[in-house]
Image: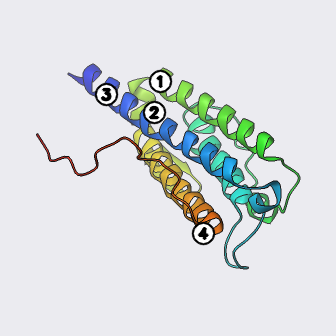
Amino acid sequence: MTEELLKEFKEHSTYRIERNTPRIVTCLGQLSEDEVWQRPNESSNSVGNLILHLCGNITQYIISSIGHQPDNRDRDTEFLTTGGFTKRELLDKLGDTVLEAVRVINEASIEELLRVRTVQGYTYSGIGNIIHVTEHYSYHTGQIAFWTKLLKNKDLGFYANINLNAKNE
């Protein structure tokens, strides 16, 4: 039973993580290079900052912690950056980060998923880290979508051809 639950947890977690990347791709496809670095106000981040932040967070919580790679994250720089990356470079960085994180999750042993560790001052098991990344990635994907909708005033079609009014079976 444990192996089945572990398999299901990994499958659902990586599915949720991977489904956000195409949404960010859609958003960046709508934005100009300048709009990617535009901030709505001084208290908010640009889409570019959010993508750098997602890469840093995913790397720290999954690739570094669960994958036993060095933690070289410079979180402040993720938010201070005001350019220097094209949309293509940001998408490549995000895609590579997500691909590596999914690999680490899929290869993680049950011992590694249950091992408790401290990341960014928080104490979680590997499972807790994966839940954190899954939630965090979705949260910031929503911010990127909201900012894109504000700038472009259009539906992004994330749920096209899906009946969201379907009742439970």
Q: CA distance from mark 4 to mark 1?
A: 36 Å
- Disc on the earlier residue, 1 or 2: 2
Q: Which quarter shows the C terminus?
A: top left
- Mark 1: few/some/many CA within 10 Å (<14, 14-19, 20+): some
Q: Amino acid at mark 3?
A: Glu
Closer to the eye: label 2 or 4: 4
Q: Earlier in the sequence, mark 3 or mark 2?
A: 3
Q: Which mark is residue 133?
A: none
The location of residue 156, given as percent across then percent down, is 53, 53
What kind of residue is marked 4? Leu
Where residue 106 is drawn, which disc sits there?
1
Residue type marked 2: Thr
Q: Say which residue label 4 marks.
A: 150
Residue 108's place in the image compared with 148, above or below, is above
What secondary structure is found at the residue carrying circle 4?
Answer: helix
In the rendered structure, are the residues bearing label 1 and label 2 in contact, judged by CB atoms less than 8 Å apart?
Answer: yes
Instruction: Determine which residue is flagged by label 2.
Output: 14
Disc 2 crowd, CA 10 A, few/some/many (<14, 14-19, 20+): many
